[in-house]
């Protein structure tokens, strides 16, 4: 019985998407349709019951799929589904700084007519306040990289993170 559980846990880890790969590809996906399509396929099996960070990335990638879709109905579907997943993940783990970066990155780039900008100030402040609480150097570096290229942070604010 113990062996069966061990093998199950081991196999579960093999099929879970790599956060390192997701983070790397997500940064590239804003300006690269192919990377977005590949990342969408990579995250296709992620469900609401999975790690909430993966759910957040899946939501963001679906929103980016709307950007690259040519059919209006698809654009609407991808955007609504993506926003729902992203907001759900943040609702489930509101203290996750990385998820706030993901949402802010989407809201910074969302067309104004979509009116998906309501959390920009809140997420920016949350990132500023929560940055020093991040224990992982990998995540801290990732968040700092986001801040440095973000339109929401002024040059003065960016200096605080050097």
Image: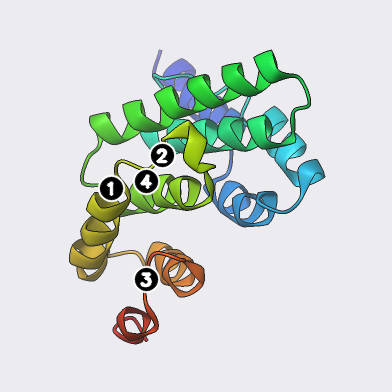
Q: CA separation, marks 1 and 4?
A: 6 Å
Q: Earlier in the sequence, mark 1 or mark 3?
A: 1
> On the picture, is 60 further left or further right than 69?
left
Q: CA separation, marks 1 and 2?
A: 8 Å
SS type, badge 3: loop
Q: Earlier in the sequence, mark 2 or mark 4?
A: 2
Which residue is the site of mark 3?
153
Q: Position of residue 96 (x, y in %)?
A: 28, 47
Q: Earlier in the sequence, mark 1 or mark 2?
A: 2
Give the quadrant of residue 154. bottom left
Residue occupying the point 39% across, 64% down:
152
Q: Position of residue 70 (x, y in %)?
A: 78, 26
Pick the quarter of the image with the C terminus.
Answer: bottom left
Confirm or deny contact between disc 1 and disc 3 (CB under 8 A): no
Residue occupying the point 48% across, 19% down:
47
| Crowding near the residue tagged with mark 4, few <14, some 14–19, many ≥20 C-alpha atoms within 10 Å | many
Which residue is the site of mark 4?
99
Q: Is residue 90 above or below residue 73?
A: below
Pick the quarter of the image with the N terminus.
Answer: top left
Q: Nearer the viewer, residue 72 or 93?
A: 72
Q: Is residue 36 above or below residue 161?
A: above
Confirm or deny contact between disc 2 and disc 4 (CB under 8 A): yes
| Crowding near the residue tagged with mark 2, few <14, some 14–19, many ≥20 C-alpha atoms within 10 Å | some
Q: CA separation, marks 2 and 3?
A: 23 Å
Q: Earlier in the sequence, mark 3 or mark 4?
A: 4
Which residue is the site of mark 1?
96
Which label was assigned to residue 154?
A: none
């Amino acid at each position: 019985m113990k062996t069966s559980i061990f093998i199950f846990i081991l196999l579960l880890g093999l099929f879970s998407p790599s956060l390192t790969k997701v983070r790397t590809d997500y940064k590239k996906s804003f300006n690269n349709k192919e990377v977005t399509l590949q990342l969408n396929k990579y995250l296709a099996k992620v469900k609401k019951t999975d790690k909430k960070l993966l759910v957040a990335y899946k939501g963001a990638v679906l929103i980016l799929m709307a950007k690259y879709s040519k059919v209006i109905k698809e654009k609407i579907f991808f955007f609504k589904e993506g926003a729902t997943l992203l907001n759900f993940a943040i609702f489930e783990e509101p203290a996750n700084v990385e998820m706030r970066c993901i949402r802010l990155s989407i809201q910074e780039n969302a067309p104004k007519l979509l009116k998906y900008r309501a959390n920009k100030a809140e997420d920016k402040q949350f990132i500023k306040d929560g940055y020093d609480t991040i224990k992982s150097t990998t995540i801290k570096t990732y968040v700092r990289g986001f801040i440095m290229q973000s339109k929401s942070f002024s040059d003065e604010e960016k200096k605080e993170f050097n």
